Image (tube, grey):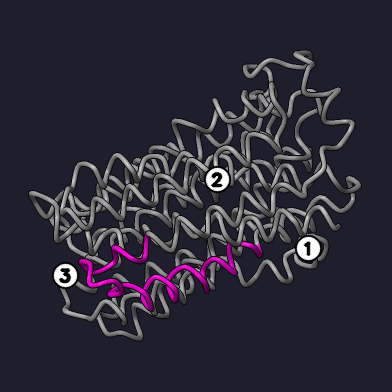
Amino acid sequence: MRNVWLLTFAQAFAACGTIMLVTFGGIVGTELAPTPILATLPVSVSIFGVACTSLPAALLMQRIGRKRAFIGSACVAALAALGIAFSVATRNFWSLCGSAFFIGANMAFVQQYRFAAVEYVEERLAGRAVATVMLGTLLAALIGPTLGQFVSRWGGWPEFTASYVALAFLCLGAALVLTRLPTPQRNLVIATSASGRSLRELLQIPDFKLAVLAGLTSYAVMSFIMTATPLSMHVHDGYTSAQTSRVITAHLLGMYLPSLIAPLLVSLLGVRLMMLLGVACNLACIAISAWLGHAFVHYFTGLVLLGLGWNLLFVAATTLLTASYAPEERFRAQGFNDLAVFGSQATASLLAGTAIETLGWETLNLVTLPLLALVLWSIVRRSALRSD
């Protein structure tokens, strides 16, 4: 598990990019955007960067290996973080969006850490490896907002400029950790193979389709609500940036803290029940947010449940996905999965700004119900097929 822990610590540094954008991007966007509707555009552009880069990232890793691709993307992210700092300092909204794209592009590589971890362990430990790497983002959830808020006014620069300068050093820290990562010998053999089923054939596999749908839903629902939260709290309801940051940090802890026991949950509950529990947590979040009000405790509780629901649904989906394809099909399957998952996330986060301004907080939450209903129907259908 040594190499899995190396990936975990690298993720702890690298994942701070997206977390800082989510925590502070909407606030900065509100100050710099030409219209309030575009306030969440930097966050959306970063997620669009994840979606656009997911398939090219998989193909690049197939060609040059995961290690070199991971290190290169971390260095690009460090430059992008400095670009964001410059954009905030000069109050250039469009430059901010452009730099945010490359933070997202790096996350397309970071999301592959979980798949890389599986390659360093026996098949029976796949769920444990995935959950362990996700603990890196738990550390990032603690490091990113806390460090970003602490240094936000340093240097006499505009607020949050120094936060992104600090982020550049965190990204370089990820690159440094990754230099210690070896390349599995089996990785070299499989990476050159173009054999296996086509994407069309993979999409005929019920488990593969359910895994993609569950992963897509976990991110779309989470991103739609989470991206709108800083705007609803800080801009509409007048909570301070520190209070908003605490809610987002609690949400991120809800997302990644369950990874401590995720391997146990996978073995005890199985992927189907984990998915059902994930959907239930999302529904509880929506009920609190849509019907109980705008008090701090409602935001806090709802966002923690949203994070927990995401974790259960996403870990179960990833575990199911890795069992649904052959080794020689992994880059094809993983690339398509991440393209679908982060494409939906990008769309959800982009729509969040418009939705919070036109629909309001309560209706915004209710809009996610049809997608969750589709996952429930797919889980029931899969269970029925298995019982035949």
Can residue 142 be found in the magenta stretch?
yes
Return the residue at label 2.
74
The answer to whether 125 appears left or right of 279 in the picture is right
**Which callout, 2 or 3, points at the residue further toward the start of the chain?**
2
Q: Secondary structure at mark 2?
A: helix
Return the residue at label 1.
263
Q: Quadrant of residue 163?
A: bottom left
Q: Is residue 266 above or below residue 343?
A: below
Check whether the beta carbons of the residues at disc 1 and disc 3 lie within 8 A of each other.
Answer: no
Bin the neighbour count of mark 2 within 10 Å (Cα to Cα): few under 14, some 14-19, many 20 and up. many
Disc 2 marks a residue whose amino acid type is: Ala
Q: Secondary structure at mark 3?
A: helix
State the extent of the magenta-drawn residues as a range: 135-164
Disc 1 marks a residue whose amino acid type is: Pro
Q: Is residue 19 above or below residue 96?
A: below
Choose between 22 and 315: the one closer to the eye.
22
Return the residue at label 3.
235
Q: Is residue 111 above or below residue 299?
A: above
